Amino acid sequence: SIPALSLPRLALLRRASFTFTSAQLSTLTSRIDMPGLTANLALFLERPAAKKARRIGFHVIRGVKIFLHGSGRTAWVVGTTALLLVVPLVFEIDREQQAAEMEAMQLGGAPGGLQAPQGLVMPPPQR
């Protein structure tokens, strides 16, 4: 199990540079029992390509966080706009459609404006 990090230690890790001390390397490899792993890991992590990869990864993750935060704001604006403008519009259109159907029924027409085609006789309603 990995030990829990306290808030001050987390803050230190966030401000830390991309180099590892020997104490950090020994902490990383203390749970793995393989000879020479610490030395190989230290050599690998100190290579310029590995440092560049960590730096790029850091910036990509930071960019994704900023994007997600901004898109959350955008989603909130779109959602509240829909609630305030679109939903009342849908209710008004529905109310107008119901009023048109009621008017068509009162005038003797079929609901929805459907009429029998010319030349065809509709059978009388069955009781």
Image (cartoon, helix red, strand yellow):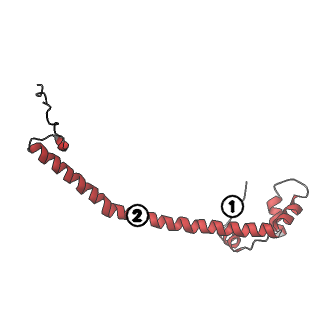
The residue most toward the left is: 107
Q: Is residue 25 visible?
A: yes
Q: Give the quadrant of residue 118.
A: top left
Image point 16% across, 49% down: which residue?
A: 100
Q: Amino acid at mark 2?
A: Val
Q: Which residue is mark 2?
A: 78
The residue shown at (74%, 74%) is 17
Q: Of the residues shown, which amino acid type is indicated by label 1?
A: Ala
Q: Name which of mark 2 and mark 1 comes first in the sequence.
A: 1
Q: Residue furthest top?
A: 127
Q: Is residue 2 left or right of residue 111?
A: right
As drawn, the residue found furthest toward the front would be 119
Counting from the top left corner in percent of width and height, residue 53 is at 74, 66
Front-most of residues 27 and 91: 91
Give me the residue at 18% from left, 41% from top.
114
Residue 20 in sight: no
The residue that disc 1 covers is: 4
Q: CA distance from mark 2 to mark 1?
A: 39 Å
Which one is in front, 90 or 33? 90
- In the picture, the quarter occupied by the N terminus is bottom right
Residue 107, image x and y in percent? 8, 44
Q: Image height check: is 90 above or below 57?
A: above
Secondary structure found at label 2: helix
Q: Quadrant of the C terminus?
A: top left
Q: Is residue 69 left or right of residue 113?
A: right
